[in-house]
């Protein structure tokens, strides 16, 4: 299922039969093809402006999943760098960093993102930056805990005795062992990013109409919910299955890596 969403994201122009912004005043609110008065020309029907919903959903997967992936990569790069620095601190500085981090971890990412968007302004790019900043504390937390645990192990102590600097310790000794943890945390952060980007789009704080983003498509469909319920049901199901598939893959990776470590 996740592979299907990735294919949609990568090959949206090839898969879709229409333009995502193309309006057709002669085809307003056409029902989906599986309904009695539906048309096979419009697989998921059309919206209140006559735009093909199937095309907009495919492009919506591209915008939402692509934006979420970029935010997670940026958050991971910054979070791992800060987490490694925090993990190697000692004394009062370490205590202050840990308490600040714990305070940030207690705040939901969506709330942090909304506050940042309120400062930066609305738009997809600003919402991506907001979610990136909101996700950083999670990567910092897990990286810091991992680094602090590794610094006590014998192979790190041996490298220290050989004269390795903190940078060399992290790059050559600790980072190669962090791959598994980062893969698992990355998939979990990806599902959070998808939900947050969709939520900000739905609240008119992120992507703006007519951009085909799943949250925006869902918000646009609210005005005609009673006339055309598929305008809300289809993008809602797309968000649901995208998050579900990412979470299942993340759980599977975590289980597989745990078994590998135990063996």
Image: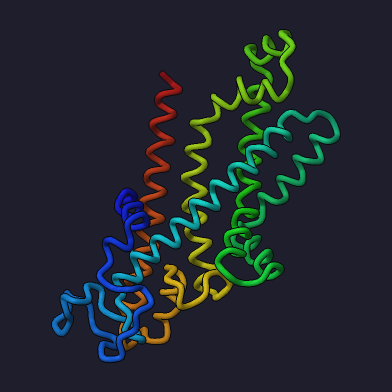
Looking at the image, residue 159 sits to the left or right of residue 225; the answer is right
Looking at the image, residue 109 sits to the left or right of residue 34; the answer is right
Looking at the image, residue 121 sits to the left or right of residue 43; the answer is right
Return the x and y of residue 16 as percentages of the image width and height: 28, 66
119 relative to 62, above or below? below
Judge by depth and name the residue closer to the eye, 12 or 35: 12
Color theme of the render: rainbow
Return the x and y of residue 157 as percentages of the image width and height: 69, 13
Picture quadrant where residue 128 is located: bottom right
Picture residue at 42% right of the left edge, 71% below the top: 212
Q: Quadrant of the C terminus?
A: top left
Picture residue at 35% right of the left edge, 63% below the top: 238
Picture residue at 25% right of the left edge, 70% below the top: 17
Judge by depth and name the residue closer to the eye, 89 or 8: 8
Picture residue at 63% right of the left edge, 60% below the top: 130
176 relative to 246, above or below? above
Return the x and y of residue 24 as percentages of the image width and height: 30, 86
Picture quadrant where residue 111 is located: bottom right
Looking at the image, residue 62 sits to the left or right of residue 163; the answer is left
Q: Residue furthest left?
A: 36
Judge by depth and name the residue closer to the eye, 242 or 12: 12
Q: Residue furthest right?
A: 92
Q: Residue furthest bottom?
A: 26
Return the x and y of residue 97 as percentages of the image width and height: 77, 40
């Amino acid at each position: 299922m996740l592979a299907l969403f990735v294919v949609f994201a990568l090959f949206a122009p090839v898969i879709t039969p229409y333009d995502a912004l193309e309006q057709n005043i002669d085809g307003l609110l056409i029902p989906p093809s599986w309904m009695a008065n539906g048309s096979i020309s419009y697989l998921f029907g059309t919206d209140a402006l006559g735009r093909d919903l199937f095309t907009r959903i495919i492009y919506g997967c591209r915008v939402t999943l692509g934006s979420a992936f970029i935010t997670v990569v940026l958050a991971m790069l910054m979070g791992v760098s800060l987490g490694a620095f925090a993990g190697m601190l000692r004394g009062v500085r370490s205590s202050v960093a840990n308490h600040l981090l714990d305070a940030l971890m207690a705040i939901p990412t969506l709330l942090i993102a909304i506050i940042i968007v309120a400062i930066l302004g609305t738009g997809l790019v600003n919402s991506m930056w907001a979610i990136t900043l909101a996700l950083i504390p999670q990567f910092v937390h897990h990286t810091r805990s991992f680094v602090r645990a590794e610094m006590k192990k014998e192979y790190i102590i041996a490298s220290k005795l050989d004269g390795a600097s903190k940078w060399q310790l992290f790059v050559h000794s600790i980072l190669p062992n962090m791959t598994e943890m980062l893969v698992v945390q990355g998939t979990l952060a990806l599902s959070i990013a998808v939900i947050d980007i969709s939520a900000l789009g739905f609240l008119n704080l992120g992507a703006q109409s007519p951009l085909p983003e799943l949250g925006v498509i869902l918000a646009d469909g609210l005005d005609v919910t009673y006339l055309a319920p598929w305008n809300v049901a289809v993008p809602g199901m797309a968000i649901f299955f995208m998050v579900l598939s990412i979470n299942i893959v993340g759980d599977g990776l975590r289980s597989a890596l745990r078994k590998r470590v135990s063996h």
